[in-house]
Amino acid sequence: MIGSMWEGGSMLIDQARKTIQAYAPDARMVRLNAPPVVGGVLLGMEAAGIKPGQAVRLRLIEESSSL
């Protein structure tokens, strides 16, 4: 969950959790600690057939947080 999603209160969060867990029972909702662009870059890499490892994810978060 990013941005103002957390500000929506339990009415929004509980419904989102219920809907998500219906499709992915083991999913958990966590507050994003990185700029949203990191997710976009990771999705783009995966779409291009690149499988970024944990080290790449951490480096992207670290590098983008300092901007």
Image: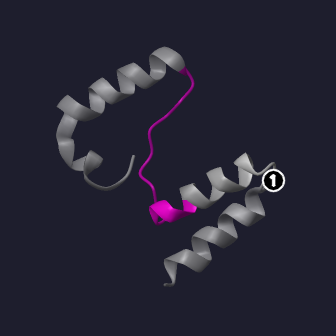
**Which residue lies at the image location 74% right of the left edge and 57% below the top edge?**
54
Mark 1: amino acid: Ile
Q: Which residues are magenta?
A: 24-38
Count how many numbered circles sit on residues in the image: 1
Q: In the rendered view, does 13 fall on the left or right side of 32?
A: left
**Which residue lies at the image location 46% right of the left edge and 15% below the top edge?**
22
Q: Residue furthest top?
A: 22
Q: In the rendered view, does 52 fall on the left or right side of 28?
A: right
User: Whole-percent x and y of residue 16?
Assistant: 34, 29
**Which residue lies at the image location 28% right of the left edge and 46% below the top edge?**
5
Does residue 11 show up magenta in the picture? no
Q: In the rendered view, does 53 fall on the left or right side of 8?
A: right
Pick whichever, 12 or 10, lies toward us: 12
- Height in image: 55 above or below 5? below
Label 1: element kind: loop
Q: In the rendered view, does 9 fall on the left or right side of 65?
A: left
- Height in image: 63 above or below 20? below
- Height in image: 23 above or below 46? above
Q: Which residue is mark 1?
A: 50
Per the picture, the main secondary structure of the magenta-coloured stretch is loop
User: Whole-percent x and y of residue 63?
Assistant: 60, 79
User: Whole-percent x and y of residue 52?
Assistant: 77, 56
